[in-house]
Amino acid sequence: MRHLDRYVFKDMFVPLIIGTISVVFMFLANTLIFYSPQVFSKEMPMSAVGQYLLFKIPQTLNMTLPVGVTIASSLAISRLARESELTAMRAAGIPVRRVILPMLIMGALVAGLSFWLTEKVTPRAEERATATLRKIFASAEAIGLQSNVLLQLNRGEYHASIGTASKGNGGKVLMKDVLVFQKPKRGVDWFVQSPSAVYDDGILEFNDPKIWILEGERLILKTPKKWQINVRVSLDDFFGQKLPEAMSVRELGKSIENWRSRGQSTRVLEVDYHNKFAVPAACFVFALFSPVFSLYFVRGGAFIGVLVSIIVVFLYYNFWVLSSQVLAKQWILPPIAGAWLPNLIFLIAGVIALWRLE
């Protein structure tokens, strides 16, 4: 039986790697398409965008490893059936469930890998990805620091006009003849004029500015040595909350306890908590479900069973989104049920199909 196990493992290994990588590239391409208007219209450096996509790979793997297991197990069982090897095994008294056992072991191993990625790798990678995205959106290209252009900063809190702008060392932007307008409240207007300013990582610092504050009919003049605008304020509003995928299971559990102690609703965090276990477990579920259902369609052609399994995977993900992201978060299903219901249904369907196949 060890020869059978090694034989099946060998058939699964290459399709698992190729299938997973292919779907990862598809997910990353969708991410790039999502940010492409900002990337190409504002000429952001592609090296920074490539770095961001690199850091997104661990999170993407968590969603694509079940697809890889599906493709690998379906191809392996389909090849055994097409070349009559499965028929010979059954004639020798080997049941189908014994042939599928190595696939279940592989599914369990991949599930363990997926959980390890979720717990150890993804949180750190997501922190780096968020930091990279923050730098991209805080770059001079994203802010739009150009000569002879009226800019809006901090979501329109400030309006600035720059005489000349040029690139400095380390990504800095050097500006001359800068004029800034601000209306902090009704009846108060600020006018800031500076001979030079420097922009660096979200901080716009003015040198020797003159600040005129108009309050009704009163005009106040201030002449500080330095004056700053923190453009990162609006970015912190966007990136400030640490996302669940950037937390480990323990960190997410502590967040749930803290929210609960303050009387806040923890339902969304609870759903994400259970998904950290349910999504990796899908690798094991599809290691059973996919080969069994591939056998029902293998006579239709070389890849019909594989195609049907892939379609079923996407149906699973749609069901998972409906169950965990919609029904559970809208108080229709309990968080644990929303996360685990798709796995349970597909596991039961796989066991029933295997029993009928035997």
Image (cartoon, rainbow, N blue to C red):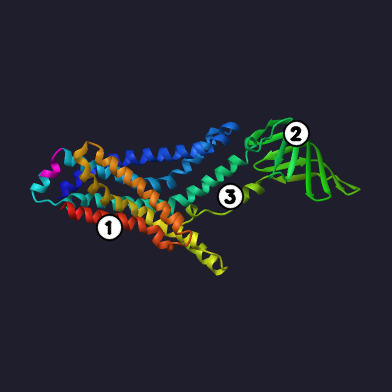
Q: Is residue 264 above or below residue 22?
A: below
Mark 1 belongs to which amino acid?
Ile
Question: What is the magenta segment's predominant secondary structure?
Answer: helix
Q: Amino acid at mark 2?
A: Ile
In this rendering, is residue 286 above or below 25?
Answer: below
Residue behind mark 3: 239
- Residue 327 pos. (x, y %): 44, 58
Looking at the rendered structure, which numbered label has been put on residue 162? 2
Residue found 35% across the figure and 47% down from its top: 315
User: In this picture, which residue range is highlighted in magenta?
Assistant: 83-87
| Precedes in sequence: disc 2 or disc 1 | 2
Residue 190 coordinates in the image, percent (x, y):
82, 45
In the displayed orientation, state which residue is furthest to the left: 92
- Label 1 belongs to which residue? 348
- The kind of residue on which mark 3 rests is Phe
Horizontal relation, residue 141 to residue 159: left or right: left
